[in-house]
Amino acid sequence: MSEYYNVSEIFGENVFNDTVMRARLPKKVYQQLKRTIEEGKDLDPATADVVAHEMKEWAIEKGATHYSHWFQPLTGVTAEKHDSFITAPGEDGKALMSFSGKELIKGEPDASSFPSGGLRATFEARGYTVWDCTSPAFVRQDAAGATLCIPTAFCSYTGEALDAKTPILRSMEAVNEQALRLIRLFGNTTSKKVFPSVGPEQEYFLVDRKKYLKRKDLIFAGRTLFGAMPPKGQEMDDHYFGGILERIAAYMKEVNKELWKLGVTAKTQHNEAAPAQHELAPIYASCNIAVDHNQLIMETLKKVAGRHGMTCLLHEKPFAGVNGSGKHNNWSLTTDDGINLLEPGDTPHENVQFLLVLTCMLKAVDKHAELLRESAADVGNDHRLGADEAPPAIVSVFLGEQLEDVLSQLISTGEATSSLDGGVLQTGVKNIPDFAKDATDRNRTSPFAFTGNKFEFRMVGASDSIAAPNVVLNTIVAEAFSDACDILEKADDFEMAVHDLIKEQATAHQRIVFNGNGYSKEWMKEAERRGLPNICSMVDAIPALASEKSVSLFEKFNVFTRTELESRVEVLYENYAKAINIEARTMIDMAGKQIIPAVIKYTTSLANSINAVKAACGADVSVQTELLMETSRLLAEAKQALTRLTEVTTRAAVMEEGREQAVFCRDRIITAMDALRAPVDQLEMMVDKEMWPMPSYGDLIFEV
Ligand code: ADP
Ligand code: MG
């Protein structure tokens, strides 16, 4: 194929999308499948067989030899088990290719090794993958050949969710139901469905693969565990939106093409704040598809990097002291007929609906700030949140001057409205200016910002699935809508009631609104005064997931049962302890086998040179001696810290999995890791570069 191509010709070419289905499936089968996709109607076995057969034929034309149920267990990444299409050879010795409706709809991977937080006792280790037909199947072509991938949900034998996908689908259902109730109150009788639209912006780093392979910390932990700052950092701001290097440009070009073939709308690409850091954003899509596509984006970024002699780092903080990577989760609510409920609009009537939606969101975020914070917690993100480069660990909402002004008008003119003669709604609304989109200023320090016609949740970590934050967003908004509808559906005077409710919600939850600098010390104090939670570590964020408040929220909307939540809490603690343990063991390995021996070599060479100079001419060796003293002192400090780290890591290893172990990892192991890193980073600045056993920060991020 020529190097140049027409995007519209390749876009979605490997996706079993609506066009393909319509073209290939018998009309009746197509209609039935559509009903399943759109209305969740059961798919009967005969129809499923026809769909499976056609899907297989189509996939084989694309070179597929295998199919795979593609699912998202609680590891944060996707999993798949490949089966080939072939059947046992017949008498003629020839194998046929087959794929049944049963195989399409349900799979049973050997699930016992995926985290379940105790949900699957060993005697009942079964897990099922079930086709999520709302997310289209696709053929992935790579070195492994071509594989038909079927997006699925992953559940236990008893129906408990074991994955990231199932709760997404449940939460979408919840917000759909409640949002429909809400828009019906405003006279909308035509929209049939409301779904969250999500556009995640993905940040990542690229490093040269040969250098990457010389860093065990990058290989095992995905981030550097040692490393002195280079002479130049990002202070010049010359990388941000800067010109893209040829090597990177060629990479991005291939990433885009791969993604387009998979129907992922890769749209925006640019350099990010830190050197070697970049961003890719797709056009927003329906929530569950956005979740799947974000996984495909992460997979593709990694895979294509290898082909270009690079490695893509998705870790939230690959390099200490250099900007980390996040994922901005843009979120809005859209109806099937294209109305965005977060669009301020320009007619007063629509503005009232918008203001109700807006204040419901304030209520949702205020009430469930801890839960939202938890949804963005992952091990790597602990290095970012609150570190003056990413949002603080305090959840607040940025509305921009114009909207905040509208809210304060509402709150204060509320007093005056009682004197108005039946025109409550109108007067309330007349004060509302048009919200030109550009009027919302950018505030990069806010974790949850209104940006014209969507909210941007900026806390999410770069390596994390966006499923959890969207499950939380969908469900907390569903709850706020439900509460509002409970009141408004009973109201005698709807207009009066809605006005009162908007005012009440705006007043009750104005503490969550903050337009100032989220990085400032003053905000920490102010937030504390307002009673907003400031949760600095993942370990402290986790309990919110199964708090009584969260359990009743999720159970009310059938998103999670208490058991599912408690099992997820277990998984999170385990994941945390495992990650810290890997980091600690990697440090022990690097320090013991690479760094300390290198420093010893250096000190030995210094000592030899001191002796040699003395013997040769008796010249002044004070510089060498001073260096030797200093490196030896740091070496001793490093050795001591290494012993300490080994001790605590060994202790953690024998602890029972759970909160106590996670807390121990955070309080004891991380402290011991920091204590080892400090002298080593100083040594790196002193030891002969030729002798330092690994590439430096400068080598890694300035010479990609
Ligand atoms: P930024 O200036 O923050 O980079 P962009 O305009 O590039 O913002 O959009 C960022 C992401 O937000 C993109 O993925 C885009 O598709 C998505 N987005 C735009 N509008 C909406 C919306 N109404 N709902 C959800 N996501 C949206
Ligand atoms: Mg953004």
Image (spheres, rainbow, N blue to C red):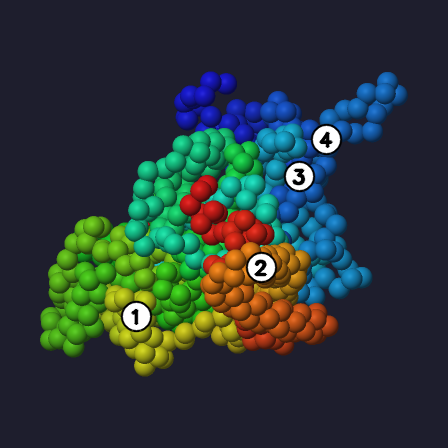
Residue 158 appears at what percent x and percent y? 70, 59
Q: Earlier in the sequence, mark 2 or mark 1?
A: 1
Name the amino acid type tagged 1.
Answer: Ser
Q: Circle 2: is it few (<14), some (14-19), or many (20+) Cα within 10 Å? A: few
Is residue 395 visible from the viewing direction of this image? yes
Q: Which residue is mark 1?
A: 520
Which residue is nearer to you in this view: 242 or 132?
A: 242
Q: Reading the chain from its start, which is encountered first: label 1 or label 3?
A: 3
Which sits earlier in the primary sequence, circle 2 or circle 4? 4
Asked whether the beta carbons under mark 3 and mark 4 sit within 8 Å of each other, the answer is no
Give the CA separation, mark 3 to mark 4. Answer: 10 Å
Work out whether residue 505 or residue 542 is closer to the camera in this orientation and state it: 542
Residue at image mark 4: 85
Closer to the eye: label 1 or 3: 1
> What amino acid type is highlighted by mark number 2?
Ala
Q: Which residue is mark 2?
A: 615
Which marked residue is nearer to the observer: mark 2 or mark 4?
A: 2
Taking the view exactly as shown, the residue that stands out farthest to the right is: 91
Residue 459 as seen in the image, left or right of residue 80: left
Q: From mark 1 to mark 3, how far is it between C-alphas?
A: 49 Å
Using residue 259 as the reference point, say whether residue 565 is left or right of it. right
Q: In the rendered image, which quarter is residue 532 located in?
A: bottom left
Q: Pointer 3: residues within 10 angstroms few (<14), some, or many (20+)?
A: many
Give the SS element for disc 3: strand
Q: Secondary structure at mark 1?
A: loop
Disc 3 and disc 2: Cα gap in Å?
A: 72 Å
Q: Are the residues tagged 3 and 2 within 8 Å (C-beta)?
A: no
Query: Which of marks 2 and 3 precedes in the sequence?
Result: 3
